[in-house]
Image: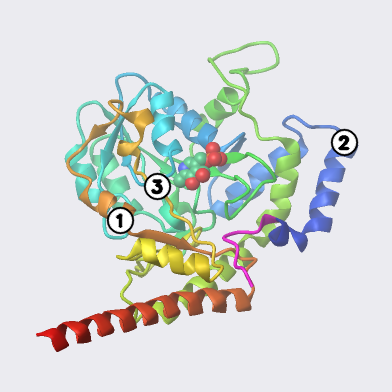
């Protein structure tokens, strides 16, 4: 049996009837643009996050760009973030004309708070942590630092729907928490979608204007806006999915727990775990020192493994000369050469999880046998 990294059609089967009925209701009403389901989803998602407002937008990238624009971050400003995220984290800063200042990550693969402290300059306007893989960054320290220097915190929560710190979901948001709702995310739309969550009424209002051509009402543009609205059809399906999110996240966590337990004795670095920090395992990522043979073994065993992400932002040709490196990104680069993402979709069966575990264990059993044969050979010759 092959284990796919993710199988969206299988994942969606159990919700098929509910999703179709939600879409059908929109077709019946015809309120395709900023319809009733958008407002309902925004209210439900804000409540789910423990925040006051949510503004639905057309993608995670739009969420990040509009969040920076709503805060007035633009040319001349610097934004401190990481290089090991999906490209949009850095490109959204460039798209608003600001300068990304890239700092190293800590051992948990999230932004290094000390490196942020050292990177703050008079031009810094925002700190931009990413809750990579679904594991929250050290928000309390980042928020304290931001307050000390009068900065904003924009959090890229794209991989972290439902993640918590100290049992609270609101703790991951910062001033503006930006979520992608891409079909591969923990809370997925059937296409591109995103949402921004905040407790600030003025920012929520500005975001609503910016996502809709800058229109304050039908006739008057009060800002240079974009067409970046969340589609009503997507919002309708997101409401169905939101009711299932905690169950899906619990399944992801139980798969991660099974991997953690099975791989404890292996020569790999398991995902970081910290008391009070609750990951939703958007990706289950471990570090291996023998990545090429590891990937060959997984492929031979029919286990689909990915790398998130193989090339950090500062090594991307598109960003050459456009980003500032605040010191060496030693951990970022080392981790990029060692990370592997194992299948962790909530749709995986127990049997598929077992196949992944067996494949990884077998790889290291065979590798250990080969090393010991080689060592015997050396000792026989000496
Ligand atoms: C961390 C992170 N930021 C931003 C994005 C961009 O989201 P979207 O593809 O919805 O524009 C993604 C999506 O892959 C992501 O994982």
Q: Quadrant of residue 241?
A: bottom right
Q: Is residue 101 visible?
A: yes
Q: Give the label, 2 or 3, closer to the camera.
A: 3
Q: Which residue lies under the disc numbered 3?
A: 130
The percent coordinates of residue 155 (x first, y second) are 42, 43
Q: Quadrant of residue 380?
A: bottom left
| Horizontal and vertical percent position of residue 108 | 32, 60
Helix, strand or loop for disc 3: loop
Label of residue 335 in the image: 1
Residue sitting at x 65%, y 59%: 7
Nearest the eye: 53 or 85: 85
Residue drawn at point x = 62 percent, y = 78 percent = 351
Tell me which label, 1 or 3, sits earlier in the chain: 3
Residue in the foreground of this view, choosing between 372 and 137: 372
Q: Quadrant of the N terminus?
A: bottom right
Does the segment drawn in magenta span residue 4? yes
- Residue range corresponding to the magenta coloring: 1-8
């Amino acid at each position: 049996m092959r284990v796919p990294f993710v199988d969206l059609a299988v994942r969606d089967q159990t919700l098929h009837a509910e999703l179709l009925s939600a879409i059908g209701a929109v077709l019946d009403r015809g309120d395709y643009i900023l319809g009733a389901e958008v407002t309902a989803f925004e209210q439900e998602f804000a409540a789910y996050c423990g925040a006051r407002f949510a503004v639905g937008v057309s993608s995670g990238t739009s969420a990040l760009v509009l969040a920076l624009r709503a805060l007035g971050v633009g040319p001349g400003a610097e934004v401190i973030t990481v290089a090991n995220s999906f490209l949009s984290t850095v490109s959204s800063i460039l798209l608003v004309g600001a300068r990304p200042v890239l700092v190293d990550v800590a051992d948990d693969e999230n932004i290094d708070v000390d490196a942020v402290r050292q990177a703050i300059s008079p031009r810094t306007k925002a700190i931009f942590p990413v809750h990579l893989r679904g594991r929250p960054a050290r928000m309390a320290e980042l928020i304290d630092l931001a307050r000390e220097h009068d900065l904003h915190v924009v959090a890229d929560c794209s991989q972290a729907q439902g993640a918590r710190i100290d049992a609270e979901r609101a703790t991951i948001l910062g001033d503006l928490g930006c979520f992608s709702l891409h079909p591969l995310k923990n809370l997925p739309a059937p296409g591109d979608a995103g949402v921004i969550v905040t407790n600030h009424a003025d920012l929520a209002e500005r975001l609503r204007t910016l996502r809709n051509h800058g229109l304050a009402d039908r006739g008057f543009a009060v800002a240079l806006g974009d067409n970046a609205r969340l589609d009503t059809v997507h919002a309708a399906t997101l409401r169905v999915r939101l009711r299932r999110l905690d169950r899906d996240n619990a399944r992801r966590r139980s798969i991660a727990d099974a991997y953690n337990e099975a791989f404890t004795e292996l020569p790999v670095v398991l995902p970081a775990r910290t008391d009070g920090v609750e990951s939703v395992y958007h990706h289950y990522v471990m570090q291996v020192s023998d990545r090429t043979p590891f990937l060959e073994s997984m492929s031979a065993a029919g286990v689909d493994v990915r790398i998130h992400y193989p090339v950090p932002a500062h090594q991307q040709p598109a960003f050459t000369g456009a980003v500032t490196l605040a010191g060496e990104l030693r951990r970022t680069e080392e981790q990029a050469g060692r990370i592997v993402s194992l299948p962790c979709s909530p749709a995986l069966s127990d049997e598929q999880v077992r196949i992944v575990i067996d494949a990884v264990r077998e790889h290291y059993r065979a590798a250990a046998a080969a090393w010991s044969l080689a060592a015997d050979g050396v000792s026989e010759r000496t």
